[in-house]
Amino acid sequence: MHIDYYLSLNSPWAHLGAARIEALAARYGATLRPFPCDYRETIFPASGGLPLPKRSPQRQAYRMQELRRWRDHLGIPINLTPQSYDEGFAAACVIAARETQGDAAALRLAHRLLKALWEEDRNPGERETLAALVTDAGLDAPALLALAEDPRWAAMRQTDSEAALARGVFGAPSYVIGEDIFWGQDRLEFVAKRLAQAA
């Protein structure tokens, strides 16, 4: 069994689901491949989505209510107003790790970046902070940051984002198993049922 995992490194919902999707993959022996996609410039414009600052006040207010509800329900601390950053280079690091060291390394890094942003009020857009988080994920920070400068990873992110759109992905996180798309960490119960069916 295999799960393609489409996420934004800025997504609180990806953070809230991070430990649970890892646990589900482990429970059912499924492989889990992360794709840190470009939602702002590629997926949203093509699918009708809007980046947070462009959403209506009503949608932004409801999002905050939902974040508080899920924070309390899951018992996961979350900073509701984290620093904003351009995730492009961080995504290049995750993709470079995925392509050179495997899915598990990329997943550790992606989830470490999310935790830093949403729980620790740290900014992965700062190179010093990013280097420390790469090290936390058990990877060689100087080597990976140097490797991530290669433009092929940004090109691969664009290709991954276009492939996600072609599969029907429009939001983050999305968990895709075969032809089935599960959008949002609040759909992980259905992911579990799908994995159980295939087990």
Image (cartoon, helix red, strand yellow):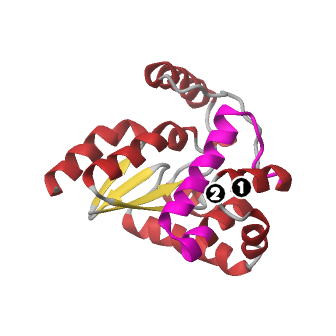
- Residue at (55, 29) in percent of width and height: 63
The span shown in magenta is 97-126
**Mark 1 Cα-neighbour bin, 10 Å: few <14, some 14–19, many ≥20:** some
Quadrant of the drawing holding the N terminus: bottom left
Q: Secondary structure at mark 2?
A: loop
- Residue at (75, 71) in percent of width and height: 143
To which residue does mark 2 refer?
138
Q: In the image, is 113 to the left or to the right of 162? A: right
Comparing 79 with 57, the one in front is 79
**Mark 2 Cα-neighbour bin, 10 Å: few <14, some 14–19, many ≥20:** few
Q: Is residue 35 at least partly visible in the picture?
A: no
Quadrant of the drawing holding the C terminus: bottom left
Q: Is residue 41 at least partly visible in the picture?
A: yes
Comparing 140 with 10, the one in front is 140
To which residue does mark 1 refer?
135
**Residue 98: x percent and y percent?**
55, 69
Q: Find out whether the residues at labels 2 and 1 contact each other: C-beta distance under 8 Å.
A: yes
Image disc number at residue 37: none
Say if the magenta span includes residue 125. yes
Comparing 139 with 124, the one in front is 139
**Residue 34: x percent and y percent?**
49, 61
Predominant SS of the magenta segment: helix
**Residue 137: x percent and y percent?**
63, 54
Number of numbered labels in the structure image = 2
- Residue at (48, 50) in percent of width and height: 171
* Position of 196 relative to 29 (above/below): above
